[in-house]
Image (tube, coloured by chain):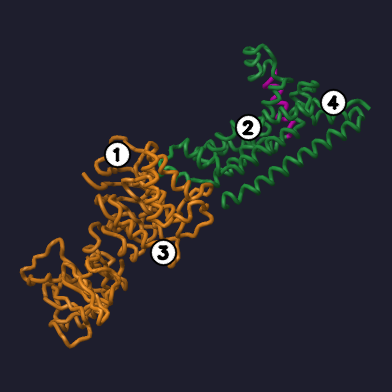
Chain colours: A green, B orange
Amino acid sequence: MQDLDLTPLWLTLELAAVTTVILLLLGTPLAWWLARTRSRLKTPIEAVIALPLVLPPTVLGFYLLIGLGPDGIVGGPWRAMTGGALAVTFPGLVIGSVLYSLPFVVQPLQNTFETIGNPLLEAAATLRAGPLDRFFTVVLPLARGGFITGATLGFAHTVGEFGVVLMIGGNVPGKTQVISIAIYDHVEALEYAQAHLLSAGLLAFSFVVLFLVYTLNRRWRPALGR
Amino acid sequence: MNGLDASFRLARADFELIADLTIPARGVTALFGPSGSGKTTLLRCLAGLEPEARGHLQLDGEVWQDDTRSVFVAPHRRALGFVFQDTRLFPHLNVRANLDYGRRRAHPIDTRHIQQERFEHIVELLGLSGLLERYPAQLSGGEQQRTAIGRALLTQPRLLLMDEPLAALDAARKRDILPYLDELRRALDIPVVYVTHAIDEVSRLADHLVLIESGQVQASGDLMPLLSRLEYPLAHGEGAMTLIEARIAGHDDAYHLSDLAFAGGSLTVSRQPGEIGDRVRVAVHARDVSIALAPTSQSSILNVLPATVAEISQEDPARVTLRLRLLRPGRKGAADAGSEEDVFLLARITRKSCERLELAPGREVYAQVKSVALVG
């Protein structure tokens, strides 16, 4: 039996971690805006964000491949600036993963922000808290559950992603070969032992993460008194 | 100018607020009216929480809103305290942190000593010392509302706005918290605007009254004279009453009675717990006042006050309501031209009696007060 190469596992975790951080940074203001706005753009933007939920990953991957390619609307300027390509690279994978997992972060955050609603923010305003102050001292602590859910789903969804990375990542070991693709390769090569190890590892990892998150979420709630 | 001066227009799909309002620099002003009349909306306009409202607002000469000059001071830059009906305590903070939230932001540079002193004063005033480490969900409704009041007061506001703070409480909790509010009324020297639709809260707490109906100010002014004005709905219906502000003049321990003195005379009531000189507020219901043309000693009624009929209005086919101006001791009817300090009573009698006694404005009568209720 061949030695098991764990590089795809570390690459997957790195991709998921970077993606989750970017998703939280982008998703928080976006979800906040969606929760508060009365703009007519709200509904079309919500629909766009939800697209990855219904589209086959290959469709998204196909457009990303074109967009990120050397002559694409993102890949072209990127090449002009850095001299390198985007498709079939780690940054390209991050961009794809962020788009693909966006609804899994934005929707729980938006729901949480909508639940918190205006009343407590008005109370904070009458207690002299300005808009940013209100966000950091009232919204963030009360939205903790939404952040945990959003971050977990975003992370887990990125770990489990297959179609998009297959389309835009190619399958470069050590660079873009993530665990789901490595498993696929092992199965193709009839290396069932390695496929078993990686699959069982991913299964156990996913279970442990979700279990921890649900436990923490439950334990924190009584402290909020709700 | 001192006090609060405001004028607002706000159009909503189902109702329109058109209100001009002047509120004195001291004392509690009750915004009183039926549910849906726009009281809460008007209060929110004062706080800047209804950004669509157009108009102007100034407090002690400081302009908070003036749409002719595009001035709008954001709510968090207004030195006001707001007590919401639903308390709106921060669920993730304990009572101490809730109390501190506004205090820290309104007065970040106070010395630790001054902060501590003020904090302890409010905590004691509102009876919160045993609750400081608890979370809002662990408090009763009354305790939550007291915390919310303390939180607003610790910002040291120049205007305190209270939106039906007792409406969500049951009668027992209400009785618990009313003494605190009463104490507050005496301790504060800022204007307090108090929204309510409960007349018992008005009679106990308010000094001034603004009557609101369908988004418009119907009348405003000092509470006591307004209560007896026959052109407003307060003087009609079963609950109609007037208030008298009096001092305890003496106690009669033999008969277990107390004498109360006020500008329009004196009243004998059942023994009061207070000291001589204490201020009390009593309510006299229109249904408890009857009329005689001569003072009679052949009656069980102790309180008989000379008065002139000021106005008469028909209540229903059987009954009329009289507005009586009490004659002040030492002055006689015709010479009594009427002044700011006049004390009025309402009397509800049958139309038949009214005609039999030939009552008409100007007539001198004796008001027989069957019962007097202490309100605070």
Q: Is residue A123 above or below residue A32?
A: below
Residue toward you, B220 or B245: B245
Q: Which mark is residue A23?
A: 2
- Answer whether residue A171 is visible to the viewer in this image: yes
Neighbour tally class for label 1: few under 14, some 14-19, many 20 plus, Cα within 10 Å: some
Q: Which mark is residue A221?
A: none
Instruction: Residue A61: say if magenta.
Output: yes
Q: Chain of mark 2?
A: A
Residues at marks 4 and 3 touching, judged by CB atoms closer than 8 Å:
no
Neighbour tally class for label 2: few under 14, some 14-19, many 20 plus, Cα within 10 Å: many
Which residue does the numbered mark 3 point to in the structure image? B176
Give the foreground label among 3 and 2.
Answer: 3
Q: Identify which amino acid the numbered label 2 is placed on.
A: Leu
Give the foreground label among 2 and 4.
Answer: 4
Q: Is residue B317 above or below residue B25?
A: below
* Magenta span dominant secondary structure: helix
Location of residue B28 (image quadrant): bottom left
Q: Identify which amino acid the numbered label 3 is placed on.
A: Asp
Give the foreground label among 4 and 3.
Answer: 3
Q: Which mark is residue A5?
A: 4
Label 4 sits on a secondary structure element that is loop
